[in-house]
Image (cartoon, grey):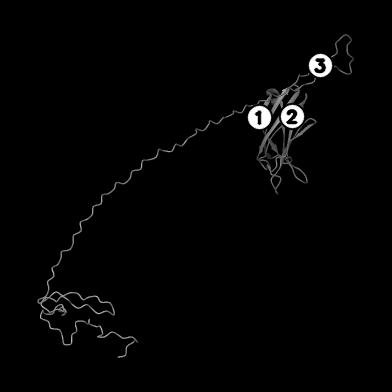
Amino acid sequence: MAYCGVMEVRVIEGKDLRNVDHMSKMDPYIVFKIDSQVKKTKEANNGGKTPVWNETLTMNVIPGQSVLSVEVWDKNTLADKMIGNAMVNLEKVFDDGTEDMWVEVRHPTKGSSAGMVRLIFFFQSKAVVSPTRYPSTSTPMNVGHAPVQAPPPFQQQAQPVYQQAQPVYQQAPQPQYVYQQPPPQPVYAAPIQAMYAQPVQAPPVQPMYAPVGYAPGYPPQQVAYGSSPQPYTQGYPGFAANQPPPMNGYPGNYAPPAGYNPNVRPGQPAQYPQPGYPPHY
């Protein structure tokens, strides 16, 4: 059965590809060929043995084309090297309309396995044209018959674009906390401690006893320098006037020593200095 339509090839990834670049990681790409059409993917930079493409290519299919050539190459500065190739039969893709498969590529000369690539096919067919419907150019057309019209050009249907609405999340308002200062705490004054004066006890007065034969005396008079002391006008009990009182601790019948002058204080000179001081002794 002849098929006619549009085929999409989604190139997903590769795995276990044969390493042909021993100086650095490979930059693989794939070339698809169907009849005279050639499509090529972008290089997977530093993809190595497990490149990822995620690229979609579109190819037109006309009747008589059902085999797709797949070639995996490594991009090099000097010359590209083929990693492996494979031939894919598209009959199942045309029948089912879609197919997800892993295609094994093989060494171009040895035929050994050179890795695998994952491809997803989508096919949308056009009107099928039978070869018998085309008029023969060698036989003239019968007069009176309507000419055979060529099928209208195929118009590719636009693929629906699904846009998923992103949910909008609105953050709930955060509660506002107002700090209230606690009421002031009452201040209590410390109780006043009563202070009581401690009674002060005067020390006991020790009695003083005069010695035996003690007679009280009068204190000596204070006499300014240069003046004569006042004579004693009142005699001490038991003594005559102008007689000094006895010394403390002496008996009451004390007799003044010889040469005692009651008008002269002890330690005072008998005569005061005359003009022309200092005196000459």
Measured in 3D between alpha carbons, the distance from the residue under mark 3 to the one under mark 1, in whole angstroms, is 35 Å
Q: Which residue is the extreme one toward the top?
A: 144
What residue is pinned by disc 2? 58
| Nearest to N terminus: mark 3 or mark 1 | 1
Find residue 43 and report its image quarter.
top right
**What amino acid does circle 3 point to?**
Arg
Confirm or deny contact between disc 3 and disc 1 (CB under 8 A). no
**What amino acid does circle 2 point to?**
Thr
Residue 276's label in the rendered image is none
User: What residue sits 74% from the left and 25% below the top?
Assistant: 6
| Nearest to N terminus: mark 2 or mark 3 | 2
Determine the secondary structure under disc 1: strand
What residue is pinned by disc 1? 100
Find residue 243 and report its image quarter.
bottom left
Badge 1: residue crowd in 10 Å (few <14, some 14–19, many ≥20): few
Is label 3 or label 1 in front?
Answer: 1
**What amino acid does circle 1 point to?**
Asp
Q: Position of residue 25 (x, y in %)?
A: 69, 45
Residue 133's label in the rendered image is 3
Q: Left or right of 53: which side holds 238?
A: left
Quadrant of the drawing holding the N terminus: top right
Determine the secondary structure under disc 2: strand
Determine the secondary structure under disc 3: helix
Badge 2: residue crowd in 10 Å (few <14, some 14–19, many ≥20): some
